[in-house]
Image (spheres, helix red, strand yellow):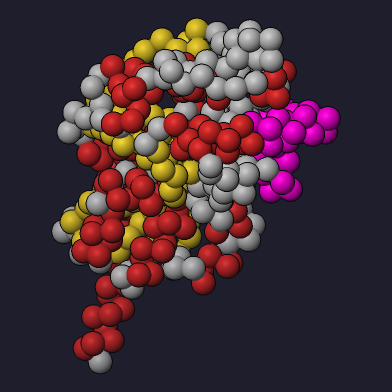
Amino acid sequence: MNILIASDSFKHSLSSYEAGKNLAGGIKKILQEAEMIVSPIADGGEGTVQALTDAIGGKQIETQVHDPLMRKITASFGILGDGVTAVIEMASASGIELLTPEERNPLHTTTYGTGELIKAALDHNCSRIILGIGGSATIDAGAGLLAALGAKFPGSGKETILPTGGNLNQIHTIDINELDHRLQSTHLRIGTDVDNPLTGERGAAAVYGPQKGAGPQDVKKLEQNLNKYADLLNGFTGKQFHTLPGAGSAGGLAISLMAFANAGMESGFDLIAEETGLEARVKHADLVITGEGKIDRQTAYGKTACGVARLAIKYNKPLIAVAGTVGNGTDELYNMGFDLILPIIESPVNLETSLREAPNLLENTGMRIGRILKLNDRFMKKDSSS
């Protein structure tokens, strides 16, 4: 039996590769003859750098950047085995988890640090960049990112503005004379897992502003600022960004890169699946296993496990999903390619213990899967002999 394990990371606990290896180890204890393939996967959010460097090979580089409030921090990005492809998670420089709850307010945050990561990748002679944009603390439409790459943002009085979500309305024009020229010859793929437009009732401010610390009046100001900045970009490029599907992801970060760089936006899962050759592996497998920290009704709306399920359906492969927590609303997932959903928790336990014990819990779950498969094999043999 050829078993493919394509798991996402288990947040704050295990990388996607570590989760897969622990599951595989448990299965092998029961089914020694099974051929196990571990294919790390992600959707462009947290764990994307680790998943791709584990799946393809490569290294991680640390560099000094600025966090969303312009404090110096150390962040990292990956360079894949080809030596020319960089993988960047914007959350490592501009992520919401870099801030305390009291510090979170997208009026004051900037994507400047993400721009510094892109510059560092260019300085390492990378000509391809994969940018995952989940988990941001920002709604500055990527203007801060452009500032780190050399763009200038004069105000009405010609003073230079460092863009944040709260001052986009003060930008009078955009000076790209000193914008890093290497962007034009760099293929930049932006991975996102949402389809929200930039503005409107499903836009970056309305939907994600409150999650990032914005109050009702803040949301109104952010909405106005995004509209004004998008109008400014439209004047430069002739492109309409307000209603572009996915433009609301990460506070609109993608639109600045799409305006002034060789950048395109696509499904984060599909991007990572393509880079890792996941589809071919699913096609070859007899059984596919996926997993992530939590599986519930939200899984159906673009989470990694659902992406794996789409491929399993395409090639008519049975699919088992495992999760740290199995929440409400999973019944509909059984109509979307999932054949079995298993929690890894076997008894009541607190979060701290479950995170610490995740390797053992996943290995034990792998053993349970192995026993289920062994039992099924016995039934199949019994039916064929009767």
Q: Nearer the viewer, residue 187 or 94?
A: 187
Q: Is residue 359 visible?
A: no
373 part of magenta stretch: no
Horizontal and vertical percent position of residue 18: 33, 37
* Furthest residue in direction bottom, as rendered: 386
Image vertical order of residue 43 relative to residue 59, above or below: below
* Furthest residue in direction right, as rendered: 217
Q: Quadrant of the C terminus?
A: bottom left
Image vertical order of residue 315 relative to residue 13, above or below: below
Horizontal and vertical percent position of residue 44: 43, 40
Q: Is residue 307 visible?
A: yes
Q: Is residue 41 left or right of residue 225?
A: left
Q: How many discs mark residues in the rendered view?
A: 0
Dominant secondary structure (helix, strand or loop) of the stretch shown in magenta: helix
Q: Quadrant of the N terminus?
A: bottom left
Horizontal and vertical percent position of residue 57: 21, 34
Picture residue at 31% right of the left edge, 24% below the top: 182
Q: Which stretch appears magenta? A: 200-229
205 part of magenta stretch: yes
Q: Is residue 265 left or right of residue 104?
A: left
Horizontal and vertical percent position of residue 85: 26, 32
Q: Nearer the viewer, residue 176 or 60?
A: 176
Image vertical order of residue 309 relative to residue 367, above or below: below
Q: Is residue 109 left or right of residue 339?
A: right
Picture residue at 56% right of the left edge, 56% below the top: 301
- Name which quarter of the figure residue 351 lies in: top right
Picture residue at 27% right of the left edge, 73% below the top: 377
Picture residue at 42% right of the left edge, 15% below the top: 178
